[in-house]
């Protein structure tokens, strides 16, 4: 499997993980003020997930641009 294909598979997994993180944050917000103590933890996890996804997408663009050159 090429680096591009491997990265695409990773992005697919990260996309699913990001949707789950987004839903966790959404669910937490709906339940406020219950569990307000977990806001920072859930928000940080969501941020990290989306940051990792964005970084992977940037890397994929770079790899695809390099492959096209």
Image (cartoon, rainbow, N blue to C red):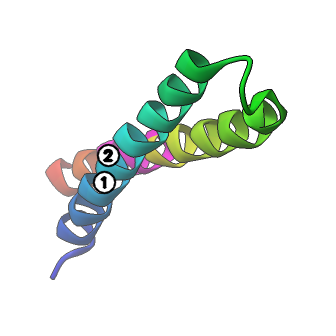
Instruction: Give the class, few, some or many, for how many residues have Cα within 10 Å of label 2's Cα (few <14, many ≥20).
Output: some
The reply to whether the C-beta atoms of the residues labelled 2 and 1 are less than 8 Å apart is yes
Compared to residue 65, the image places residue 67 above or below, namely below
Residue located 74% across and 17% down the image: 33
Say which element carries label 2. helix
Judge left or right: residue 55 versus residue 32.
Answer: left
The residue stretch that appears in magenta: 54-61
Residue located 30% across and 63% down the image: 7
Q: Return the mark for residue 11.
A: 1
The N terminus: image quadrant: bottom left
Q: Position of residue 35 (x, y in %)?
A: 74, 33
Q: Position of residue 18 (x, y in %)?
A: 41, 42
The extreme right residue here reads 37
Q: Is residue 58 visible?
A: no
Compared to residue 20, the image places residue 27 above or below, namely above
Occupied quadrant, residue 19: top left
Q: Position of residue 53 (x, y in %)?
A: 44, 45
Residue behind mark 2: 15
Q: Depth-wise, is mark 2 or mark 1 nearer the camera?
A: 2
Say which element carries label 1. helix
Q: Nearer the viewer, residue 44 or 55?
A: 44
Judge left or right: residue 2 versus residue 45.
Answer: left
The question of residue 12 being in magenta is answered with no
């Amino acid at each position: 499997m090429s680096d591009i294909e491997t990265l695409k598979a990773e992005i697919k997994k990260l996309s699913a993980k990001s949707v789950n993180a987004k839903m966790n944050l959404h669910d937490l917000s709906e339940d406020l003020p219950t569990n307000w103590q977990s806001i920072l933890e859930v928000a940080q996890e969501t941020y990290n997930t989306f940051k990792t996804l964005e970084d992977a997408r940037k890397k994929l663009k770079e790899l695809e641009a390099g492959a096209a050159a």
